[in-house]
């Protein structure tokens, strides 16, 4: 018997497919998310739009707050550590969260290195903007990849850009002559074996989710149609006018993303979605997606 | 050719689909109750039993699933087992009562307690690699239930009539023998 095997880590990610993972800041929100049909919650003290607004260094949440949420819900609880912050990840491992998100939403602790994730029993999810970044994180041990998008904006454009880029990169790898793949690996900055594996599978070797800017059921349906297997919704639910209703509607759209009638039904009369941000109004050095490499 | 339905509201449905298709069988991903009539058997995959309970209510799946299970084979894995059971001590789950077992959710603990183990399966006459993810335990079995596999004294694979329930995830392995067994039920 062996605990925390890589297959058990990826296995949990498989179980979260076809659903919605919601950012929550307290027990009450966690219960709303669970009640609405979320497959998991991400416990954090400040959702991305508040981090953006309030500024300052964003760190791992208070363990007591994460533990309260674990007690309150039966679905998996995820939590974020800063990029490269090995000690925060170890604390989250001790708490026994179900997934650690080594996340660009928090202020990076290391501007050069990400965590070596194979050393942990807890599975990790990491962000990416393209195939090279995805395969570097998988090489370090990530059991799930999510495209980054631009968190806390309520603007889906970056999430779409990253998902399209990732899918395009995969298509390229699959159509290349086998003799070209080492050079492709070099140019992607990705481990060769994982490039070969991606080509063999025609998709990433771990589940591929999307995040960063989802604010409506239609946004969720769009990302699923572009290849996301589940969506993370950060600020989009609890910054909207009627969070419980928005949460239920986004869950519906994620399951029935290919059925416009159901997505239409889910989209009616939801009240105001979160106020969005234009990406060009955010200076490059304040874009969260630029964190990590 | 027969069709295997795989409930695809949320959870590990793709891996089950891959496995069944590898065996040369037709599959249908089920997202609406009316699709059930096109299936000869059904798989309820792992996922989150709380979430699936909510989704059963939202899409009116409960009665159609119960009726399906009374006449045709159903396999439930992990959360699927919890939903097929006749008793769960958690008000967030409403079980379908298709197999006489009591299930305990997350009986091993959170994800850090998830594990893999090679376990002898008498009904397959070989060892099978079992992957347990936030897995349930079967606390009680009625005498009508046949225990196919056990681990450390707990049943992990059980069968009653044409209902097959597993606490682990055969779809995450490379070995299709459990799916093959189910297709013959």
Image (cartoon, coloured by chain):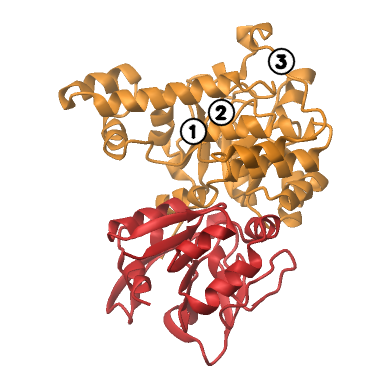
Determine which residue is flagged by label 3.
Answer: A277
Q: CA–CA distance between discs 2 and 3?
A: 24 Å
Disc 3 chain ID: A
User: Are labels 2 and 1 assigned to the same chain?
Assistant: yes
Is residue A278 placed above or below B29 in the rendered structure? above
Do tag 2 and tag 1 residues touch (Cβ < 8 Å)?
Answer: yes
Q: Do the residues indicated by labels 2 and 3 lie within the same chain of the protein?
A: yes
Q: In the figure, residue A102 lies in which quadrant?
A: top right
* Residue at x 44% of width, y 21% of height: A165
Mark 2 / mark 1, whichever is N-terminal: 2
Give the chain letter at badge 2: A
Q: Quadrant of residue A101?
A: top right
Marks 1/3: CA distance? 31 Å
What number is the disc on residue A83?
A: 2
- The chain in orange: A
Labels 2 and 3 touching (C-beta < 8 A): no
Q: Secondary structure at mark 3?
A: loop
Callout 1: chain: A
Q: Is residue A9 above or below residue B182?
A: above
Find residue A92 and report its horizontal and vertical position in percent.
62, 44
Residue A21 appears in view:
no
| Residue A283 picture location, percent across and down | 65, 7
Q: Secondary structure at mark 2?
A: loop
Q: Are discs 1 and 3 both within one chain?
A: yes
Q: Residue A115 bears which disc, if any? A: 1
Q: Colour of chain B?
A: red
């Amino acid at each position: 018997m062996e605990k925390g095997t890589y297959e058990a880590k990826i296995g949990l990610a498989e179980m979260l497919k076809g659903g919605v993972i919601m950012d929550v800041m307290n027990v009450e929100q966690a219960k709303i998310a669970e009640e609405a049909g979320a497959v998991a919650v991400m416990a954090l003290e400040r959702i991305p739009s508040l981090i953006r607004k309030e500024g300052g260094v964003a760190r791992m949440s208070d363990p007591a707050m994460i533990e309260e949420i674990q007690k309150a819900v039966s679905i998996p609880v995820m939590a974020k550590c800063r990029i490269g912050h090995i000690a925060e990840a170890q604390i989250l491992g001790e708490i026994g969260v179900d997934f650690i998100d080594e996340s660009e939403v928090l202020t990076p602790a290391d501007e050069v290195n990400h965590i070596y994730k194979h050393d942990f029993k807890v599975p990790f999810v990491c962000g990416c903007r393209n195939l090279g970044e995805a395969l570097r994180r998988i090489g370090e041990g990530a059991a799930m990849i999510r495209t980054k998008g631009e968190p806390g904006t309520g603007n889906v454009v970056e999430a779409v850009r990253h998902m399209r880029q990732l899918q395009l990169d995969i298509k390229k790898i699959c159509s290349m002559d086998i003799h070209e793949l080492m050079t492709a690996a070099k140019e992607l900055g990705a481990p060769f074996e994982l490039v070969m594996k991606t080509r063999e599978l025609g998709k990433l070797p771990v589940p591929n989710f999307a995040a960063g800017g989802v604010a409506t059921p239609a946004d969720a349906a769009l990302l699923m149609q572009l290849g996301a297997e589940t969506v993370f919704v950060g600020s989009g639910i609890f910054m909207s006018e009627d969070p419980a209703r928005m949460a239920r509607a986004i869950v519906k759209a994620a399951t029935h993303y290919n059925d416009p009638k159901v997505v239409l039904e889910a989209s009616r009369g939801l009240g105001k979605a979160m106020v969005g941000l234009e990406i060009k109004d955010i200076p490059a050095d304040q874009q969260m997606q630029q964190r990590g490499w | 050719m027969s069709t295997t339905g795989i409930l695809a509201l949320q959870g590990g449905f793709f891996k089950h689909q891959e496995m069944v298709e590898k065996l040369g069988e037709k599959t249908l991903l089920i997202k609406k109750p009316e699709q059930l009539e096109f299936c000869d058997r059904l798989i309820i995959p792992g996922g989150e039993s709380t979430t699936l309970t909510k989704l059963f209510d939202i899409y009116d799946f409960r009665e159609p699933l119960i009726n399906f299970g009374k006449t045709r084979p159903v396999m439930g894995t992990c959360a699927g087992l919890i939903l097929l059971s006749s008793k769960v001590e958690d008000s967030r789950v409403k079980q379908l009562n298709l197999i006489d077992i009591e299930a305990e959710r997350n009986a091993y603990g959170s994800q850090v307690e998830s594990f893999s183990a090679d376990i002898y399966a008498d009904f397959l006459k070989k060892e099978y690699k079992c992957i347990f993810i936030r897995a349930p335990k079967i606390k009680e079995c009625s005498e009508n239930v046949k225990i196919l596999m056990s681990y450390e004294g707990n049943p992990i694979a059980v069968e009653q009539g044409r209902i097959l329930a597993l606490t682990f995830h055969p779809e995450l392995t490379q070995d299709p023998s459990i799916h093959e067994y189910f297709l013959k039920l």
